[in-house]
Amino acid sequence: MTTFENPDWLAFVAGIIEHPDADLPRLVAADWLTEQGEQDRAEFIRIQCEIDAHRYGKAAREGDYDARDGVSEEWGDLFALVAREGVLFNRHCDEWWPNFHASLKPFPHGLSCVVIRRGFPAELRARASWVWGGECEQCEGDGNRWGGGSALGGPCPACRGVNPTPAHGYEVIRSHPVTRVVVTDREPLRMNGGWQWLRQPEHDNSSTVTDSVFDALQGGSRRLYSIVAYPDRQHALDALSAAVIADARHPQPVLLATSPASTASAPVA
């Protein structure tokens, strides 16, 4: 059994998921990691918590020197922490988070990534088919590289020839303290003075979400059976993020028999 399969570690992670805004559970987990010989992972958690708590932490990460109110020892110490953060991340990111592309900051232009904050995955950015599963949008369910029944080029690089695409994002959300999800190919529909999410399969466009995500949407004005409207775009995006997280962690009961193998979770790291 590895350190990250240990029931104590899984309990620490569960506590952090339950209290994502608190540093104390993360620091307690870091102390435990030190005792298990995982010094670098423990140091990374402590450093990220310290940087995020600093008033200039974000500016230092982004190299925003104009934010400084003067050259001081405080800034020197902060830049040393940011440099060490980068060293640890580049050395271990594939080891600590082997199943997805990790980053210290979101990629521009909607490229998929999982953003690491305060030592753990915190923000997920990806296409809908990766987040909640469904027909692969690159091969359109065909399973090969070029789609349309072509046998050229081998399996599709997006779903690896397996269709429908599994809900990879939901697995990440269930096993890590993710607090923000950006579904990069979903955009609320601006219509009739509001920003709307639409229920599948009544609608089929970039503003549609699954039935379970639609039912988890909060705070909007429901119009008919298949539309939820929000006063502005940001409210709509925030509501979708919260609904995806709620749907992943607290799914509605499904009245189908499932085998133990189908419900097993992968170890978290």
Image (spheres, grey):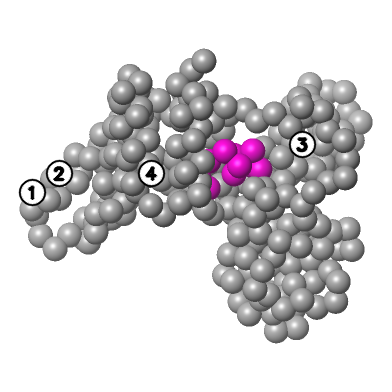
* CB under 8 Å between discs 4 and 2: no
Name the amino acid type tagged 4.
Pro
Give the residue at x 77% y 55%.
Answer: 212
Q: Earlier in the sequence, mark 4 or mark 2?
A: 4
Q: Which residue is mark 1?
A: 73
Nearer mark to the viewer, of 1 and 4: 4
Magenta region, mostly helix, strand or loop? helix
Q: Earlier in the sequence, mark 1 or mark 4?
A: 4
Give the residue at x 61% y 76%.
Answer: 232
Under circle 4, the secondary element is helix
What separation in Å lies between label 2 and label 1 (alpha carbons)? 6 Å
Q: Earlier in the sequence, mark 2 or mark 3?
A: 2
* CB under 8 Å between discs 1 and 4: no
Residue range corresponding to the magenta coloring: 169-178
Q: Which labelled disc corresponds to residue 77?
A: 2
Q: Which residue is mark 4?
A: 25
* CB under 8 Å between discs 2 and 1: yes
Q: Earlier in the sequence, mark 3 or mark 4?
A: 4
Disc 3 residue crowd, few under 14, some 14–19, many 20+, Cα 10 Å: many
